[in-house]
Image (spheres, rainbow, N blue to C red):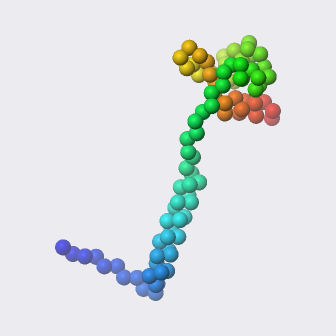
Amino acid sequence: MSKNITQLHNISPDEFKEDILSGVRKELLNFSKKFQPKTESTWLTRKDVKEVLSISYPTIHKWCHKGILKPYKIGRQIRFKREEILKVLEDSSK
């Protein structure tokens, strides 16, 4: 069984330790910038969408067929993701 020995010159143990910790901190910072925790979607009914966007039920129906709104069928009910509705609202104000 052979052992590999690495020698460091001109660096104190404290400096070596700080260099390692600095690298770990840098990697953790990069990771935390890229990490996006999943958030639970808030679901809206057609009535909620009608009120938020100030549009009628027929307009909701037309916008779904045009692809402006994306409906999700949950059981026998239609729901919309709140963040997608707010994006439509934001895009329409531009």
Q: Residue at x 53, y 55 (%)?
A: 31
Visible residue check, residue 67: no
Q: In which quarter of the image is the N terminus?
A: bottom left
* Left or right for 12, reference 78: left
User: Residue 53's x, y, as percent?
Assistant: 77, 25
User: In the drawing, does residue 44 fall left or right of residue 8?
Assistant: right
The residue lying at 42 percent from left, 85 percent from top is 9
> Which residue is at 44% across, 82% downward?
13
Q: Which residue lies furthest to the left in this view?
A: 1
Q: Can residue 85 be seen in this view?
A: yes
The quadrant in which the C terminus is found is top right
Q: Determine whether 26 is above or below 82 in the image.
A: below
Residue 47 position by quadrant: top right
Image position, residue 25 (x, y; %): 53, 65
**Number of disc labels:** 0
Residue 21 image position (x, y, % from top left): 49, 70
Is 22 drawn above or below residue 62 in the view shown? below
Specify the quadrant of the image occupied by residue 56.
top right
Q: For the view shown, which residue lies furthest in the bottom direction?
A: 10
Q: Which of 80 and 47 is in front in this view?
A: 47
